[in-house]
Amino acid sequence: MTLNNTVISESNAGHYIHQGLVTLLATEAQAEKAFSVEGYTWDWLEQQLPGQLLYSSCTDENNEPLRSVLFLHWTTNEPINPSLDEIYSEVCLLKHIHPTSFRVYPNEHEARQERDKLGDIRALDDIAKSSPGRFSYRPKTCYGHSRCLLENEERTVHKRTKSGCATHVDRKPQVESAVVSAHWFHQEHIPSLPECEFRVFIATEPSEKGIRGRIGKVIAIAKTTLDPKTQALAVRRFVTGDLHPPLQRCHLVEFALFVFEALRARPDSMLVFESLEVGVRLDIGLAYIDTVNKFFVNEITRWYGAHYFSHHICGEPKTQICKEFASAFSAFLNGST
């Protein structure tokens, strides 16, 4: 297993192991020999894509296909060598050769929707429309067609598809005859969002009452604040004082689980929200509406690419989030391999 910079040593601070490696090892431990796990770098994958090398990695000594899942994991920056588009294009042939024994995780439909963002926003808007009043608030979004819902707003937030970690986000004054390109969209400006955003980590566990036999549980909550000058993100564990009465932690948990299960209940859930069978990080903001604070989901951050903030919000040994996701992922793989 060659993994480059997944283990980092710091003077007088011990060793730091990347969350992805911890989750990988925990997934294998949970498997109890039901399947094996191998970890590789993106450089390795780049070398495998040309020719038949990746095909050979998915067959045994008799050239018989092995049940294989190519799990793509990254944080912060989307990989470029190879790019996700290149990977999905190349592995398409393998899926035709071994349609029942090989797959990529996340699936291509979900990966595309996550990067394009607008599908996620539409899903959240749809859920809000049919939700109880306390869960029905959504910031307005201009999708770039028909009349702009934000034409009377003095300030909006412009976002770009295929971005993350607050990159390609800009707060701008509204201008006349503004043109929204195919790759940019804009949303209602929520002043409180940079100052307070709750990152709610949810993992699934077995339940007879749950959708497809599983139900979500909140495993951790972080509060983040974005410095407007440096764009540095301050992270700490959620505390009771982060919400003003009458709102309490239980209300935040209730809202997060409501949205989570509503996403899993959608007809397209196993296509574009399949990873929620394992878990998710819902990034939740607060908007002050008609003298009342309302929760809303700012972004659906898939668990496989989310920063866990374990060093800031978890007690020793700081592996709790990794293990919860690993347990759910192992169960998912056992059901699909």
Image (cartoon, helix red, strand yellow):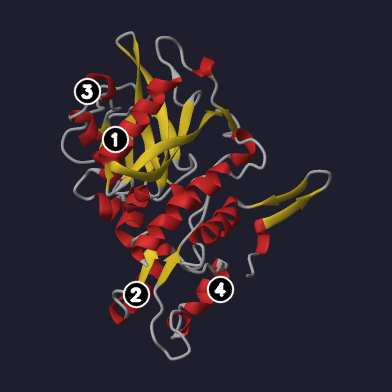
Callout 4 touching callout 3 (CB < 8 Å): no
- Distance from Cα at disc 3 to Cα at disc 2: 42 Å
Callout 2 touching callout 4 (CB < 8 Å): no
Foreground of the two, 259 or 92? 259
- Distance from Cα at disc 1 to Cα at disc 4: 45 Å
Callout 3 touching callout 2 (CB < 8 Å): no
- Depth check, mark 1 against mark 4: the one in front is 4
Callout 2 touching callout 1 (CB < 8 Å): no
Looking at the image, is 260 positioned above or below residue 223? below
- Distance from Cα at disc 2 to Cα at disc 1: 49 Å
Give the mark nearer the N terminus: 4 vs 3: 4
- Depth check, mark 2 against mark 4: the one in front is 2
Question: On the image, which quarter does residue 185 sit in?
Answer: top left
Foreground of the two, 77 or 316? 316
**What SS does tag 1 mark?**
loop
Give the mark nearer the N terminus: 1 vs 4: 4
**What SS does tag 2 mark?**
loop
Q: Which residue is mark 2?
A: 101
- Distance from Cα at disc 2 to Cα at disc 4: 21 Å
**What SS does tag 3 mark?**
loop
The image shows residue 142 at horizontal and vertical percentages of 26, 35
The image shows residue 35 at horizontal and vertical percentages of 47, 68
